[in-house]
Structure formats: structure tokens, C-alpha cells
Image (cartoon, helix red, strand yellow):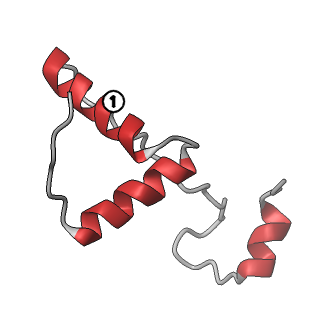
Amino acid sequence: MRTTVDIPNPVYRRLKTRAASEGSSVRALILRGVEQIVQGKAPPAARRVFPPAVPSKRPGSLRIDNAGIYDIIGFP
């Protein structure tokens, strides 16, 4: 079935960007959202990310720059 839905330009741009980042089409993304709503499924919860902790003998007194952080924490 065909239908017409007016989507505000800023929302459509975000929708198109999201679809492209997932390697999907806007149509597929919209259908997936509609199916989740119709089936009563909640969208997956956002994953909480914690920054890495830098050890210090005197917390709050560590003066460090980006180069120092890279020395302490091994980044791939």
C-alpha cells in the first residue's frame, strides 16, 4: 500500500543520514520503525559508555595533556 507522509526537512536529513550509515534505505528504516511500534517493541536502550580512568596517587591533582594520556592508556 502506498501512503504519503510529510516529514520535516531536518528530520528527513537525519533519517537519510542514519539509513546511509546503516547501509539501508530510508524506506527500510521507516518500515522497521513502524513494525516496532505496531508490535509494541521498545527500541533498544542506548549503551552507556564510561571513559577510561587514569590512575593517580593524588586524585584531583593530576595535570596531564593528550600526549600523557596516550602514554598511560594504550590506544589501538
Is residue 69 left or right of 53 when viewed as pictured?
A: right
Q: Residue at x 69, y 81 (%)?
A: 64
Observer able to see residue 23: yes
Above or below, comparing residue 5 to residue 69 in the picture: above
Is residue 13 left or right of 66 when viewed as pictured?
A: left
Q: Residue furthest front?
A: 2
Dot 1 amino acid type: Arg
**Closer to the camera in the image, 35 or 47:** 35
Answer with the quarter of the image where residue 75 lies.
Answer: bottom right
Q: Position of residue 33 (x, y in %)?
A: 27, 34
**Which image quadrant: the N terminus?**
top left
Q: Residue at x 36, y 55 (%)?
A: 15
Q: Position of residue 43 (x, y in %)?
A: 28, 31
Observer able to see residue 50: no
Above or below, comparing residue 46 to residue 14 in the picture: above
Above or below, comparing residue 45 to residue 49 in the picture: above
Q: Position of residue 28 (x, y in %)?
A: 40, 35
Is residue 26 left or right of 37 when viewed as pictured?
A: right
Answer with the quarter of the image where residue 59 lies.
Answer: bottom right
Q: Which residue is mark 1?
A: 32
Q: Residue at x 47, y 43 (%)?
A: 25
Q: Position of residue 18 (x, y in %)?
A: 45, 52
**Closer to the camera in the image, 52 or 48:** 48
Q: Secondary structure at mark 1?
A: helix
Q: Residues within 10 Å of mark 1 (few under 14, many from 20)?
A: few
Is residue 38 left or right of 59 when viewed as pictured?
A: left
Q: How many marks?
A: 1
